[in-house]
Image (spheres, rainbow, N blue to C red):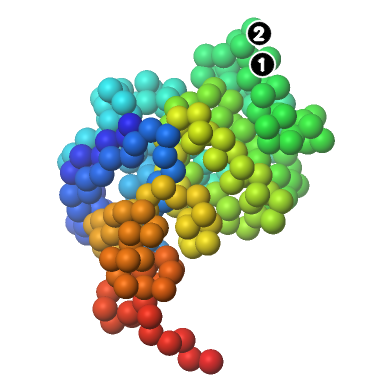
Amino acid sequence: MIRVESISKRFAGRPVLENLTFDLPDGRITSLLGANGAGKTTCLRIITGLLRADSGRVHLGEIDVAQNPMGARRQLGVVGDREGLYERLTVEEYLTLFARMQGLGGKGLRQALASVRDELELEELWRRRTRGFSQGERMKVSLARALVHSPPYLILDEPTRGLDVLAARLLRRTLLRLRAEGATILFSSHVMSEVAELSDRVLIMSGGRIVGNGTPDSLVAETGSANLEDSFVALAYGESRRANEEVPA
């Protein structure tokens, strides 16, 4: 379980997160939604240890992320908003580097590389340098990097942005397999159909706070909306943009 306990963060005196508290249970996919500037990426960076909260705590199981960031990173797989590929390396060299950084070697390393290669259909890319890869190819390599050490916790920041249909399907299939195996998965997205399909639970942020927390169906019922997108608009933007208002032709 990931536990977020009363985290707050300010930049240049401006509050970005205010007293966020939520739990992410094992074996579930949770979506984090919000308009641009709502605080989603800051929240994800604090959970992954890339930023320190001004107050509050984040635990991955029994690990306090702020007190033991290296221990936390060994438990995490992260797909960020930037892929961070080393374009002079082949896919095999790149994934080998990150697997070794996670302590893998010998037979375990070879098995881990073979597993992500097959799972993410990387055979044709395996010995190619990553320079010039398409967005879908870059996503697959980034996801392989996040999964190569079999982490129990997976954090993804808008992973399907710019993907074609086949790459998006591959990502969804992988997330569903990981959920079935007990992984704790948190991802942010602006694609409401994808969120409705994948999510066991949805967190909606606005102004650095959680303004919606429930299953896709329960949020729709709570707002009296026709669908999750309308429910998101009602909660994230307030009554001035009611979810059920008609869109002009």
Residue 239 at what x, y percent from top left?
26, 78
Q: Amino acid at mark 1?
A: Gln
218 sits left or right of 136 in the view: left
Residue 17 at what x, y percent from top left?
25, 53
| Residue 4 in view (yes/no) | yes
Answer above or below: position of 128 versus 131: above
**What residue does disc 2 label?**
107
Q: Amino acid at mark 2?
A: Lys
| Residue 157 in view (yes/no) | no
Q: Residue at x 59, y 46 (%)?
A: 172
Q: Are marks 2 and 1 in contact (CB under 8 Å)?
A: yes
- Total of numbered circles in the picture? 2
2 sits left or right of 131 in the view: left
Quadrant containing the N terminus in the rendered view: top left
Residue 181 at what x, y percent from top left?
50, 29
SS for dot 1: helix
91 sits left or right of 236 in the view: right
**What residue does disc 1 label?**
111
Residue 206 at what x, y percent from top left?
29, 63
SS for dot 2: helix
Answer above or below: position of 31 versus 89: below
Answer with the quarter of the image where residue 90 lies: top right
- Count neighbours of disc 1 (C-alpha within 10 A) and say few if under 14, some if 14 to 19, many if 20 or more: some
Q: Residue at x 20, y 53 (%)?
A: 18
Answer above or below: position of 213 versus 140: below
